[in-house]
Image: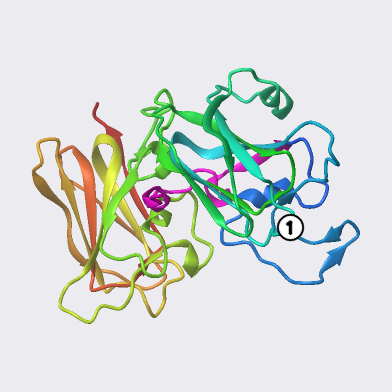
């Protein structure tokens, strides 16, 4: 089974603003753990007053009684879901035999209880068997836009992490009301390709907010040749860029020495937005962009390698 979809950003992860808003049961371990970044931790013989402590979501035993357990995640970035991973790491004798995943698109900010009672949930992953202490990937072929995802365990047990990989699809009614970060995941931007992702994912370049540590950005391996590293980004739409922010925060001895920014127009022509420019470590660099061309893609080249915290491309959509 292909897991290529896992290269796409996790739309549910907490640093992107995801939230586990409801669960019918979380007796042994809290539902919020489902969307924590990073792999689940485990220490043997660490007991709380309800039993062994797990870094995941775990419900009580049904003891033969009918019914299933479910948790609902509000995506940090609404969008198209290309695949999910139900990770049962460290759950060996207490994982669910099967799971299913459904999704919902909803406007506004209704209560968690009303969302749980909604009748319009669409099945993305029909009831499927899973194995314990493992990553269970499920590709999804559905082009719908979703704001919420429901994970159902049949009938009960524990899941460490739920990863919801896909592409952001913003509410278009909100775009154009002010300056837009055309490179933001939450606005629909997407990493198309990059030269290297040895230490961390380039998707983090497009995350909201400021990085809080070096691991929150994109860092490449050290190059031992004459080339340089790069990342290609599909922007939120065709637009004109007025301001670029290249942030090397927390990268001190491993930031790039310089960067160059180019764009690609609707007809495929390449335009230089920012010529090769020296960068400083641990600095938020802001550069005015005076090129009048509207672009739909951007490529950031760093010389020769290193790490960046964030890339912001502020401008306006032209269509």
Residue occupied by mark 1? 93
Task: State the extent of the magenta-drawn residues as a range.
Answer: 1-22
Q: Can you give x and y, in whole percent of width and height, for residue 141 in the image?
A: 40, 33
Residue 311, percent from left and from top: 35, 54
* Foreground of the two, 157 or 272: 157
Of residues 166 and 98, the one nearer the viewer is 98
Left/right of residue 274 with respect to residue 95 in the rendered view: left
Reply yes or no: does residue 18 show up in magenta. Answer: yes
Would you place residue 9 above or below residue 255 in this image?
Answer: above
Q: How many marks?
A: 1
Q: Quadrant of residue 284?
A: bottom left
Badge 1, how many Cα within 10 Å: few under 14, some, many 20+?
few
Q: Is residue 205 above or below residue 219?
A: above
- For residue 137, side relative to residue 156 (left or right): left
Q: From this viewpoint, which residue is outermost toward the top?
A: 119
What percent of the width, then of the height, locates residue 317? 28, 32
* Residue 11 shown in magenta: yes
Residue drawn at (42%, 51%) of the image: 6
Find residue 160 and report its image quarter: bottom right
Q: Is residue 122 left or right of residue 221?
A: right
Q: Is residue 219 above or below residue 143?
A: below
The percent coordinates of residue 267 (x first, y second) are 9, 36
Residue 126 figure quarter: top right
With 201 as the anchor, is 31 left or right in this view? right
Query: Residue drawn 42% across and 72% down?
Result: 251
Q: Secondary structure at mark 1?
A: loop
Q: With respect to residue 55, does 258 lie above or below?
A: below
Quarter holding the C terminus is: top left
Which residue is at a point 86% across and 60% down the rendered structure image? 51
């Amino acid at each position: 089974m292909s897991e290529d979809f896992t290269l796409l950003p996790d739309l549910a992860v907490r640093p992107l603003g995801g939230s586990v808003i409801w669960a019918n049961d979380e007796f042994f371990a809290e539902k919020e753990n489902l969307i924590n970044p990073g792999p689940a931790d485990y220490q043997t013989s660490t007991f709380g007053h309800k039993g062994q402590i797990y870094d995941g979501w775990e419900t009580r035993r049904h003891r033969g009684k009918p019914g299933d357990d479910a948790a609902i995640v509000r995506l940090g970035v609404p969008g198209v879901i290309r695949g999910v991973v139900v990770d049962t790491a460290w759950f060996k004798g207490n994982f669910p035999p099967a799971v299913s995943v459904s999704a919902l698109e909803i406007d506004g900010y209704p209560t968690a209880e009303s969302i749980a009672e909604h009748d319009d949930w669409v099945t993305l992953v029909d009831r499927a068997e899973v194995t314990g202490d493992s990553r269970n990937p499920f590709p999804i072929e559905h082009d719908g836009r979703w704001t919420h995802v429901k994970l159902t365990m049949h009938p009960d047990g524990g899941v460490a992490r739920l990863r919801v990989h896909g592409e952001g699809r913003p509410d278009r009614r909100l775009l154009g009301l002010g300056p837009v970060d055309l490179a933001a995941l939450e606005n629909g931007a997407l990493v198309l390709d990059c030269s290297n992702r040895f230490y961390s994912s380039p998707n983090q370049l497009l995350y909201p907010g400021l990085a809080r540590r070096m691991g929150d950005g994109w860092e490449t391996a050290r190059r031992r040749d004459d080339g340089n590293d790069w990342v290609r980004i599909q922007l939120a739409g065709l637009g004109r860029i007025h301001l670029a922010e290249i942030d090397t925060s927390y990268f001190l001895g491993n930031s790039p020495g310089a960067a160059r920014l180019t764009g690609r127009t609707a007809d495929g022509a390449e335009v230089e937005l920012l010529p090769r420019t020296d960068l400083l470590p641990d600095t938020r660099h802001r550069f005015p962009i005076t090129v009048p061309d509207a672009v739909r893609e951007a490529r950031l080249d760093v010389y020769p390698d290193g790490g960046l915290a964030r890339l912001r491309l502020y401008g306006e959509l032209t269509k």
